[in-house]
Image (spheres, rainbow, N blue to C red):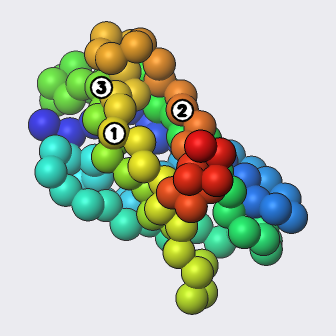
Amino acid sequence: MRVSAGIFVTLHGTLADSKRFQLLNDGEHNFMRGNTDKFQHVTLDLGEITSLTISQDGKSNFRERFAPDWFLERVTVRAGASEWVFPCRRWLSKDQDDGQTRRTLYARNAEAQIQ
């Protein structure tokens, strides 16, 4: 099973926020259960990435029977030698978990500072 919904991300940094962009690799089957997907996006220097907002548009492909429901384990962002990990471990779904299709995630090190 794979997600048929559009997945969108906004990165939030210490210098700026990115524009909202879609995670998409043309010709590839992304967001299939159990897989790790990689995407490349070019943006201006945002500084240290402190959080990200990720959402799905809830659209499903009934012809191919792909559901818009998506369980997100984590997001890893890499820029040069820097890496930030954003744990989620939640559903982005109208019908699962708390019904939210949009979540703001905080980097693992930022999460520890908030607690």
- Residue at mark 1 to residue at mark 3: CA–CA distance: 13 Å
Percent x, y of residue 21? 62, 50
Q: Is residue 29 left or right of residue 39?
A: left
Q: Residues within 10 Å of mark 1 (few under 14, many from 20)?
A: few
Q: Which residue is mark 3?
A: 69
Residue at (76% x, 60% y) in the render: 13
- The quadrant holding residue 25 is bottom left
Do callouts 2 and 3 mark residues in contact (Cβ within 8 Å)? no
Q: Which residue is mark 2?
A: 103
Q: Residues within 10 Å of mark 3 (few under 14, many from 20)?
A: many
Percent x, y of residue 57? 49, 26
Percent x, y of residue 59? 40, 23
| Disc 2 residue type (three-letter) | Arg
Quadrant of the rendering where the N terminus is positioned: top left
- Residue at mark 2 to residue at mark 3: CA–CA distance: 14 Å
Q: Which residue is mark 1?
A: 89
Give SS at disc 2: strand
Percent x, y of residue 99? 41, 13
